[in-house]
């Protein structure tokens, strides 16, 4: 390895692989850097001085390959390339761990900004902010309108029993992170389990759909939807509900979660839901259950981070405050589901 290699990416080996898989693509010596992006997978931007590409691989030292499945990410992005959903073009998938030490895939670099804060949107003004938020909803509708079988994704997941499995999965996650009493969290889980709704028509679900997981260009057009590591076939209202829950997070003082929905011009929750419903034609009569589940899921995710932080296994700005946000999220979940 050379000094220019970012952690977890041997640029010389990557270059040799690309020369073999896509002869003539790379014109010069590669440089690379790690960039933010994704819940846990590593994202790099590499360049030969003339062109840029993005490389995705699992985190260093990961122990759960099924949670960091590069082939799944590559498959969904490749499948959506022919649809209205903007995604980067894929270059190659490599599952041979001998190349860089882990499976990885390469895709084109797409220009755009992942808006993460109210301040960034405030600089654009209310009118542009509203247009971007509307596009975010419309793109989600486009995703949920894709017929999986028509784009080679008919076997991308098991829609039957999706909600039950999701609830079971996040309860298991909670149980593995228990280190303190959290008022109301078991009550929230039990309410969700008792009132499990019947899912409508299945769709491709992103799993973590929000404004800072898409790229927006200078004309306020969404150029790419990113971070597909939690995508599957399932109930599309889980995506809408998470968008709602992220918007409602303004009620919770949590610095590490994006606060874009508080920017002037950003549509209210009712407007977001109305736009999605009108454009998708989906039945949202049980949406409160999905929003309650979204708060439960976010609470479990943050409790897991708090648990690892308290054990000295996670470092980073704001992690010391994350534990304080769990109880308010649980309270919002129970409030959403109250009879």
Image: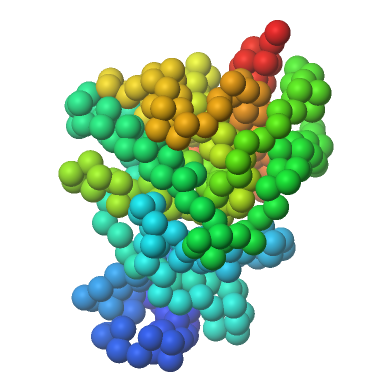
Looking at the picture, tell me which residue is in the foreground, 244 or 8.
Answer: 244
Q: Is residue 139 above or below residue 149?
A: above
Visual colour scheme: rainbow
Looking at the picture, tell me which residue is in the foreground, 309 or 54.
Answer: 54
In the image, what residue occupies the spot 70% across and 52% down?
158
In the image, what residue occupies the spot 62% across and 15% down?
336
Residue 130 seen by the camera: yes
**Left or right: 30 as drawn, with respect to 327:** left
**Left or right: 107 as drawn, with respect to 123:** right
Q: Quadrant of residue 137?
A: top left
Q: Quadrant of the C terminus?
A: top right
Q: Residue 266: percent from the left, percent from the top?
A: 32, 24
Q: Residue 161: percent from the left, percent from the top?
A: 75, 43
In the image, what residue occupies the spot 39% across and 62% down?
82
Q: Is residue 32 above or below residue 150?
A: below
Q: Quadrant of residue 330?
A: top right
Q: Residue 105: percent from the left, percent from the top?
A: 49, 71
Looking at the picture, tell me which residue is in the foreground, 142 or 55.
Answer: 142
In the image, what residue occupies the spot 22% across and 24% down?
126
Residue 246 seen by the camera: no
Q: Residue 311: percent from the left, percent from the top?
A: 72, 42
**Left or right: 239 as drawn, with respect to 193:** left
């Amino acid at each position: 390895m050379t000094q220019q290699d970012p952690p977890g990416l041997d640029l010389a080996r990557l270059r040799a692989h690309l020369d073999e898989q896509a002869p003539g693509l790379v014109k010069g010596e590669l440089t690379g850097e790690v960039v933010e992006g994704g819940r846990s997978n590593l994202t790099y931007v590499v360049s030969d001085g003339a062109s840029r590409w993005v490389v995705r691989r699992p985190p260093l030292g990961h122990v759960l390959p099924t949670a960091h499945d590069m082939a799944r990410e590559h498959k969904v992005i490749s499948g959506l390339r022919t649809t209205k959903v903007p995604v980067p073009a894929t270059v190659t998938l490599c599952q041979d761990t001998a190349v860089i030490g882990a499976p990885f895939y390469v895709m084109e670099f797409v220009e755009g900004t992942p808006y993460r804060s109210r301040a960034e949107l405030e600089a654009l003004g209310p009118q542009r902010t509203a247009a971007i938020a509307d596009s975010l909803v419309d793109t989600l509708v486009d995703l949920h309108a894709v017929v999986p079988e028509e784009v080679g994704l008919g076997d991308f997941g098991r829609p039957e029993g999706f909600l039950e499995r999701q609830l079971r999965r996040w309860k298991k996650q909670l149980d593995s992170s228990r280190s303190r009493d959290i008022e109301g969290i078991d009550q929230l889980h039990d309410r969700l389990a008792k009132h499990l709704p019947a899912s409508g028509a299945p769709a491709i679900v992103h799993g973590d759909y929000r404004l800072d997981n898409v790229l927006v260009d200078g004309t306020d057009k969404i150029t790419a939807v990113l971070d597909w590591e939690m995508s599957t076939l399932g109930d599309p209202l889980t995506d809408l509900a998470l968008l709602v829950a992220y918007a409602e997070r303004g009620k919770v003082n949590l610095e590490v979660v994006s606060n874009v929905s508080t920017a002037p011009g950003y549509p209210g929750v009712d407007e977001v839901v109305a736009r999605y419903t009108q454009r998708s034609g989906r039945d949202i009569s049980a949406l409160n259950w999905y929003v309650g589940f979204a708060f439960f899921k976010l609470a479990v995710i943050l409790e897991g981070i708090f648990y690892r932080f308290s054990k000295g296994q996670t470092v980073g700005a704001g992690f010391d405050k994350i534990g304080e946000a769990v109880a308010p999220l649980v309270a919002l979940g129970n409030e959403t589901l109250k009879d």
